[in-house]
Amino acid sequence: MTRAVKVRDLTIGGGAPVVVQGMTKGDTRDVQGTLDEIARYQEVGAEVVRVAVPDMEAAQAVGPIVKGSRLPIVADIHFDYRLALEVLRQGVDKLRLNPGNIGDASRVATVVTEAKARGVPIRIGVNAGSLEKTLKMDLGRTAEALVKSAMKHVRILEDHDFYDIVISLKASDVPTTLAAYRLMAKTADYPLHVGLTEAGASLGGTVKSAVGIGTLLAEGIGDTIRVSMTGPGEEEIRVAWEILKALKLRERGVDIVACPTCGRIQFDMWPVVNELEKRLASIPETLTVAIMGCAVNGPGEAKDAKIGIAGGKHMGLLYRDGQIVRRVEQDQMVEEVWAEVQDVLREARTGAAAVEGDHASD
């Protein structure tokens, strides 16, 4: 088990649930635009959000962003120690930096002293694409080089009696990433922020992230994750949650069980699944919806789900809690399933409110 590090009211490591992170794509100097982006990320499940801080104007925008955000904010700092000092003054919840690239020892000491005084943890983030030249010459872009670079930065912080550290070692290819995190897990007990950098666009990025992050999590390596893809940040967060859900590490939202379709199918299933996937994506509550196309596995999966469709010829049988509710024609499947989902959610929320009321009256 890794050490526990606090980021505002969240715990990373120490056996806590794996934390899902996102990073804003817009200009941090646009405070309202950044807050709007953070709110969208929170809606789909982000628990921590990182913002890029390329200059002093962006650093000074961190204060109002922190005040306006319900999620902890991480400032991404490179090269200029003054930016780190400014975001600390602005009340940032966490720093992402490499102490070796923000100036000489006295400047590093100033940043670390300020972070320690404010209880702000630091993530050391090493990327294969920006390794120190000497390491690249000696070891190449290898797992050993990534770990050696990270530990060099760790030692700088430890020399200043600072231990609220999270480590990441990211490469754009899966084998290097896996090897680096496995080696780091044997080297130090600091929490690990797991991800691949520059994973690519939608399909490729999803596959590489699922294989890389999923493999490490299945091995018990990783305390917080960020999926890094070219495209909307909301999609990164959805993929992160799907990885966690697939491994049964955490649950959030609707799990859609759907058959791959074959020559036995007797209704046009793809549009039904696609539309339901879009609608159900905004629901944070946990439940299972099954859309099945034929009589082989359809009834069984539909019965096991909270809500299910077992398909027939241009129609399907609608199940709820294992019981057939009614026959549904194909053109009504989306609306009928959606209505049942809303009914389930109303019942759950009413029950939760009643329980809360009982506790309040005790």
Image (tube, rainbow, N blue to C red):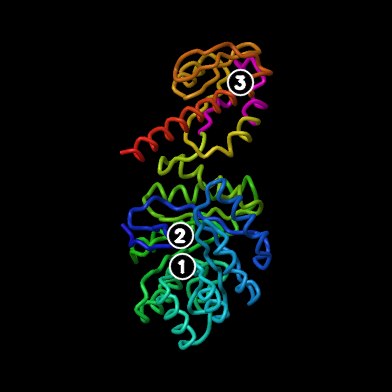
Residues 352 and 253: in front is 352
Say which element carries label 1.
strand
Relative to 290, residue 204 above or below: below
Q: Where in the figure is residue 317, as x and y percent of width and height?
A: 56, 13
Q: Nearer the viewer, mark 1 or mark 3?
A: 3
Query: How crowded is the residue under tag 1: few (<14 C-alpha within 10 Å), some, or many (20+)?
Result: many
* Residue range of the region highlighted in magenta in the rendering: 255-274
Q: Quadrant of residue 152?
A: bottom left
Residue 196 horizontal side relative to residue 19, left or right:
right
State the residue position of label 2.
Answer: 193
Amino acid type for the residue under numbered disc 2: His
Say which element carries label 3.
helix
Residues 195 and 132: in front is 195
Cα separation, mark 3 vs mark 2, equals 41 Å
Amino acid type for the residue under numbered disc 1: Arg
Q: Where in the figure is residue 25, as x and y percent of width and height?
A: 65, 59
Cα separation, mark 2 vs mark 1, equals 8 Å
CB within 8 Å, label 2 to label 1 = yes
Residue 336 got which mark? Answer: 3
Query: How crowded is the residue under tag 3: few (<14 C-alpha within 10 Å), some, or many (20+)?
Result: some
Q: Quadrant of residue 281?
A: top right
Sequence-wise, the earlier of marks 3 and 2 is 2
Say which element carries label 2.
strand
Residues 69 and 279: in front is 69
Sequence-wise, the earlier of marks 2 and 1 is 1
Residue 331 got which mark? Answer: none
Amino acid type for the residue under numbered disc 3: Glu
State the residue position of label 1.
Answer: 123
Q: Give the residue drawn at x 63%, y 24%.
A: 334
